[in-house]
Amino acid sequence: MRRLSLILTVLLLIPHLLMAQEGVLTLDEAIKIALKQNPTLQAAKYTFSMAKEAEKEAWTRYFPTVKFDYNYTRWNEEQHVRLQPVEIPPLAPGMQPITLKPGNVVTSRQNVYQYTFSFQQPIFTGWAITATHRMALISARQAELEAEETRLEVAYNVKKAYFGILTAQRMKDVAELAVKQLSHHLFVAQNFFEQGIIPRNDLLKSQVALAQAKQDLVRARNGVAVARATLNAILHREVTAPLEVEEIRLLPHPTITLREAINRALEKRPVVEATRKEVEKGKEGIRLARSGYFPHIFLEGAYRKHGNTPDCTGDGLTDAEDWRLTAGLEWTLFEMGRTRHQVEKARLGELKALAMLKEVQDKVALEVQEAFLEMEAARQNIETAKSAVEQAKENFRVTEERYKEQIDTSTEVLDAQTLLTQAQTYYYRAIYQYNLAVAHLLRLMGEEP
């Protein structure tokens, strides 16, 4: 009967256990939510889409522009040309001169309808169209790289907040353990005082230490609430929304040397590649400026039809339709050195981009070195801090036993407990610093989150 009751109890608890498990947020899930919800990243994606449309617009400049125009004009009356009298000399001897009487010749009807199809096709622009299109392509790639850089930063901020929750929870655990240990110590001290074994001063020290530990526990719990609110804000949820995260002890250690990490960052980091694209855009800017030295050749044509009715079938005065085809050349021969100054300006822009590239490369290399060294230092600190925790636990245990035997004083127990709390705090912070250093290094190298 008891076994059946136990089975029923477990079956009833299974849905609650599953619900609790479903409510736990993993690091990968948090990153996916942030990447989907982050408005800065969405804005960067829109910027990229705009740049792609600008590139497509630049591509259209290779092709002809075709236009259609339809218009209607109404005059106050039919338009005429007044002819003056003209006298034609005799065509042969004995003939009389011929005099043409003055009169009016109709040149336009009162209602005029006209439509025109026209086109213009650039033939040669001094490579201006090619340079413009290339610059638009580069700008689109830059926008894509900037969106990728934003994505890496968002993922890193999620990891930072996520590890912050784990650390705050461990600090709360340490504070709760300290309260539990000091409560037990106060219980022993109270018994010793009532038996007259220790003075009241020793009892007061234990009471003060427990009160301080309870205050530390309140601050630790507030730290957990703030850490959860921080991650909720990054995920664009209500800051007070319930949030439980999956425990992560240690991230895998990257098997890479410092030189390899720097080289990978210089090769894969989006901000470095975006700056290289700025250099390429500078070269195309020079090419665009130099197009002013060359003639521009174009071809254009038009087909026109007109009349005194909306269908433009003619007006009985002139031909109803006509067309033309024109090949043209336009060459600016003198403009007071304007093109030369534009070329020089573009060349200086390229030099500026090269200087910026060197600056960005140096900055990235320094950031990677700092993150790498921080990661290695945190890795070593974990082992040291772990050993210190074991030693502090043993020291507290021995000191507490010696206190019960009245070999050590209450002050020594409180000191041992403080050392244990500090050792545990340093240990958990070392884990957090290591995980954060690994995440920071991967972010600086441009690794996928």
Image (spheres, rainbow, N blue to C red):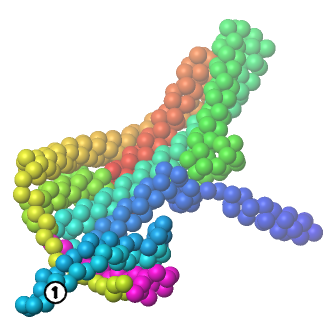
| Residue 172 image offset from top left, x and y in percent | 62, 36
In this picture, residue 202 sits left or right of residue 431: right
* Crowd tier of the residue under label 1, counting other residues whose Cα lies within 10 Å: few below 14, some 14–19, many 20 or above: few
The reply to whether residue 249 is in sight is no
The reply to whether residue 440 is in sight is yes
Q: Magenta segment, which residues? A: 297-316
Can you tell which quarter of the image residue 92 is in? Answer: bottom left
320 to 380, vertically: above or below? below
What amino acid is labelled 1 in the image? Gln
* 305 inside magenta stretch: yes
| Residue 297 image offset from top left, x and y in percent | 15, 72
Query: Label 1's element?
Result: loop
Can you tell which quarter of the image residue 87 is in? Answer: bottom left
Residue appearing at x 20%, y 45% in the figure: 356
| Residue 12 image offset from top left, x and y in percent | 84, 65
Residue appearing at x 10%, y 50% in the figure: 335
Query: Front-most of 316 and 355?
Result: 316
Quadrant that contains the N terminus? bottom right
Residue appearing at x 10%, y 91% in the figure: 94
343 to 322, vertically: above or below? above
83 to 390, vertically: above or below? below
Query: Front-most of 20 and 296?
Result: 296
397 to 356, vertically: above or below? above
Pointer 1 residue: 96
Query: Front-most of 408 and 238?
Result: 238
In this picture, residue 385 sits left or right of residue 27: left
Can you tell which quarter of the image residue 224 is in? Answer: top right
Query: Front-most of 69 and 372?
Result: 69
